[in-house]
Amino acid sequence: LQVERWYEVYRSAWVGEPSPLVEEAAQWLRNKAPESERIGIVHGDPGIGNYLHRDGRVSAMVDW
């Protein structure tokens, strides 16, 4: 999933011909990526200001 996400970012920004190196690397990553055993959500900006606390514990993550 991450390979495809970043490949689409790359494709949306390219001008002219795509880079053969990037194309080869993306294909290699697709072929070698391990199967996911579990699906999870990852917060992409884990700064201290993006957590809410209550009673000494994290009660929420924000800034999605």
Image (spheres, helix red, strand yellow):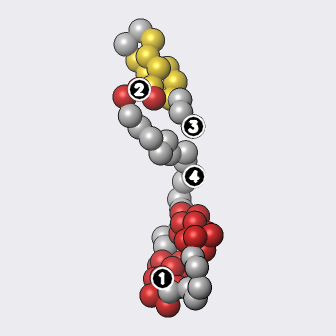
- The kind of residue on which mark 3 rests is Trp
Residue type pointed to by label 4: Ile
Residue 61: percent from left, percent from top? 51, 29
Disc 3/disc 2 C-alpha distance (Å): 12 Å
Quadrant in the picture for residue 47: top left
Toward the viewer: 26 or 10? 10
In the rendered image, which residue does mark 2 sit on? Answer: 49
Q: Label 4: which residue?
A: 39
Q: Are marks 2 and 1 in contact (CB under 8 Å)?
A: no
Q: Amino acid at mark 1?
A: Val
Q: Which residue is mark 1?
A: 22
Q: CA distance from mark 4 to mark 3?
A: 18 Å
Q: Which mark is first along the chain, 2 or 4?
A: 4
- Neighbours of disc 3 within 10 Å: few (<14), some (14-19), many (20+): few
Q: Nearer the viewer, mark 4 or mark 3?
A: 3
Residue 51 vertical placement versus 36 (above, below): above
| Distance from the alpha carbon under mark 4 to that under mark 1 | 27 Å
Instruction: Name which residue type carries label 2.
Output: Gly
Nearer to us of marks 4 and 2 is: 2
Residue 64 badge: 3
Q: CA distance from mark 2 to mark 1?
A: 35 Å
